[in-house]
Every structure is written in C-alpha cells, then in structure tokens.
Amino acid sequence: MDLKQIQKDIWQNKINKGFNTTNVEKEFCLLYGEVAEAFDAYRKKKDDLNEELADIAIYLMGLSEMLGFDLEAEIIKKISKNAKRVYKNVDGVNIRISD
C-alpha cells in the first residue's frame, strides 16, 4: 500500500467531486464528525464500523494533503519517536518519563 499515492488520489477525488479543498477549519470539523460516527457505530455495535474508520482515514489524508503534509512520512517519523519513548506505570497509568 502506498499511502502517499492514496493521499493524492483522495485529494483528486475531492477536486473531482467539488468537495472542500480550501477551508481547513471545515475539514477539522468534518473529521471530528467522522470520529463521532465511528464511536457511535462502535457503541451501538453497528456493522459499518469498518467503513467509519475508513472515513476517518480518508478525511485525515485529505486534510494532510490540504496542509501540505506527507502523512505517510509523518506516521513513519512518529512511530520511530514513539518507539524510543520510555514510560513508567504509576497507579495503573503509563506516564512518559523520557523521549
């Protein structure tokens, strides 16, 4: 799977279909709405949770393209950063103690 290409394809679909390509605030709100829909599907044990999760990823990739970020590269960097972090369990809660 090439996330970089998928991100470009999602952006092109937004252009082709006349969806929002300029209002960042609106995209954040729409993304938030998709997260709420996914949670609702989970909570109600609906069969379309998988689609709702896919919608979140699609909105996130579209927003990343709108903002000029290569989401694939950012995910790879963040995974590496997270792997190096050290945590300590304090009363059942993991507390980050170093990066």
Image (cartoon, rainbow, N blue to C red):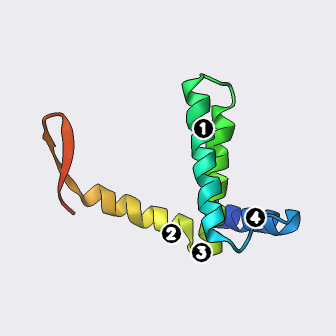
- Amino acid found under the numbered disc labelled 4: Asp
| Earlier-in-chain disc, 2 versus 3 | 3
User: Mark 1 — residue?
Assistant: 38
User: Mark 4 — residue?
Assistant: 9
| Earlier-in-chain disc, 2 versus 1 | 1
| Earlier-in-chain disc, 4 versus 2 | 4
- In the displayed structure, would residue 32 be above or below residue 80? above
User: Mark 2 — residue?
Assistant: 73
In percent of the image, x 63 and y 33: which residue is there? Answer: 49
Please tell me how crowded label 3 is: few (under 14), some (14-19), or many (20+) other residues with Cα within 10 Å: few
Quadrant location of residue 5?
bottom right
Residue 52 in the image: x percent, y percent? Answer: 65, 40
In percent of the image, x 58 and y 41: which residue is there? Answer: 36
Q: What number is the disc on residue 67? A: 3
Name the secondary structure under disc 3. helix
- Amino acid found under the numbered disc labelled 2: Ala
Name the secondary structure under disc 4. helix
In percent of the image, x 67 and y 47: which residue is there? Answer: 55
